[in-house]
């Protein structure tokens, strides 16, 4: 069992080593003119970072520090690789020992939290736009909701305004046609009824378009059904022709009914909050036992 455990641990260690080597391999062989190679040359050969580069290379066994301390040699303008190639300038080292330079520079850039290392660059590239998107997502959602809400409100407001204008126009036309018909009826019981019937149908069609709240819609439909002058007023009663006074009395009664009904039509354009309250009260009265009593 212990032997098996040792074999497993050894296999895991080998796999981990292979993964590390594979992950680091691209940094050792960045092609000339590539973005990664350019970043390494600019960053690691910069004067503020050169001493750190030499120190990193010495720790990795790529450069030989001279006695008594590595720093005394690292700050000079030449380096001594561990390979038997002699001293050379840092620029020459980056060209002649390209893999050693890339390895040391990648290690330095990866260790420097404030340096533009490949990991930081990759993280910025991968998370930059997505992080910005996630950050701005709530604002985008709120903006979309406000836009949709504004469009919906504008559409509803426009529909209500048009319906209000249509109701007012139809109400005015019906009142004028009714008064004209009633005035002519007092003089002639056979007066033409077509104009007032047309105006009544137009008003009924406008009332049929009244939408929620429920109480207002129901009221509009009742008014459309109850509008007077659906038929011509009678010329006789109980087999006798109606006289002038009788027709005038009947015309006055119908005139009062018309005014009352048209006043109710105007009330339909009241505030929505009132009709919502009426709707809730009527619904409660229907569902609560004894509430309507």
Image (cartoon, helix red, strand yellow):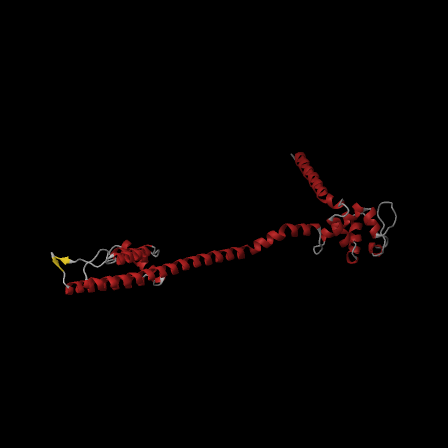
The answer to which image quadrant residue 167 occupies is bottom left
Please identify the residue farthest to the left as the structure is shown: 239
Q: Nearer the viewer, residue 23 or 96?
A: 96
Q: Residue at x 39, y 61 (%)?
A: 161
Q: Quadrant of the N terminus?
A: top right
Q: Nearer the viewer, residue 250 or 126?
A: 250
Q: 8 above or below 160?
A: above
Asked whether residue 293 is in view, the answer is no
Q: Residue at x 79, y 48 (%)?
A: 101
Question: Could you say where residue 25 lies in the image, as x and y percent from the top left?
Answer: 73, 43
Please identify the residue farthest to the right as the structure is shown: 86
Question: Could you say where residue 96 lies in the image, as x and y percent from the top left?
Answer: 83, 46
Question: Could you say where residue 152 lies in the image, as x and y percent from the top left?
Answer: 44, 56
The answer to which image quadrant residue 271 occupies is bottom left
Q: Residue at x 24, y 61 (%)?
A: 181
Is 171 situated left or right of 6 in this image? left
Q: Nearer the viewer, residue 223 or 243?
A: 243
Circle count: 0
Q: Residue at x 53, y 57 (%)?
A: 139
Question: Could you say where residue 260 lies in the image, as x and y percent from the top left?
Answer: 25, 63
Asked whether residue 151 is in view, the answer is yes
Q: Nearer the viewer, residue 1 or 157?
A: 157
Is 120 situated left or right of 33 in this image? left
Q: Quadrant of the C terminus?
A: bottom left
Is 99 situated left or right of 156 in this image? right
């Amino acid at each position: 069992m212990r032997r098996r455990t040792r074999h497993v641990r050894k296999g895991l260690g080998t796999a981990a080593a292979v993964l590390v080597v594979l992950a680091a391999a691209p940094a050792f062989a960045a092609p000339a003119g590539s973005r990664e190679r350019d970043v390494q040359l600019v960053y690691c050969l910069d004067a503020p970072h050169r001493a750190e580069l030499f120190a990193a290379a010495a720790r990795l066994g790529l450069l030989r520090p001279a006695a008594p301390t590595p720093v005394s040699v690292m700050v000079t303008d030449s380096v001594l690789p561990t390979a038997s190639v002699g001293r050379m300038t840092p620029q020459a080292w980056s060209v002649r020992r390209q893999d050693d330079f890339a390895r040391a520079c990648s290690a330095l850039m990866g260790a420097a939290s404030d340096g533009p290392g490949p990991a930081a660059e990759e993280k910025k590239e991968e998370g930059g736009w997505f992080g910005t998107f996630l950050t701005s997502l709530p604002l985008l959602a709120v903006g979309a909701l406000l836009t949709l809400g504004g469009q919906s409100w504008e559409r509803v407001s426009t529909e209500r305004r048009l319906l209000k204008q249509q109701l007012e126009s139809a109400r005015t036309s019906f009142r004028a046609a009714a008064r004209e018909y009633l005035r002519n009826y007092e003089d002639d019981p056979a007066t033409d009824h077509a104009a007032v019937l047309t105006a009544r149908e137009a008003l009924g069609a406008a009332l049929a378009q009244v939408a929620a709240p429920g109480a207002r819609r129901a009221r509009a439909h009742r008014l459309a059904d109850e509008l007077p002058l659906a038929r011509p007023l009678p010329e006789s009663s109980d087999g006798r022709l109606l006289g002038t006074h009788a027709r005038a009395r009947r015309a006055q009664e119908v005139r009062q009914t018309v005014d009352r009904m048209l006043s109710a039509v105007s009330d339909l354009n009241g505030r929505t909050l009132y009709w919502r309250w009426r709707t809730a009260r009527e619904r409660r009265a229907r569902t609560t036992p004894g509430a309507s009593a």
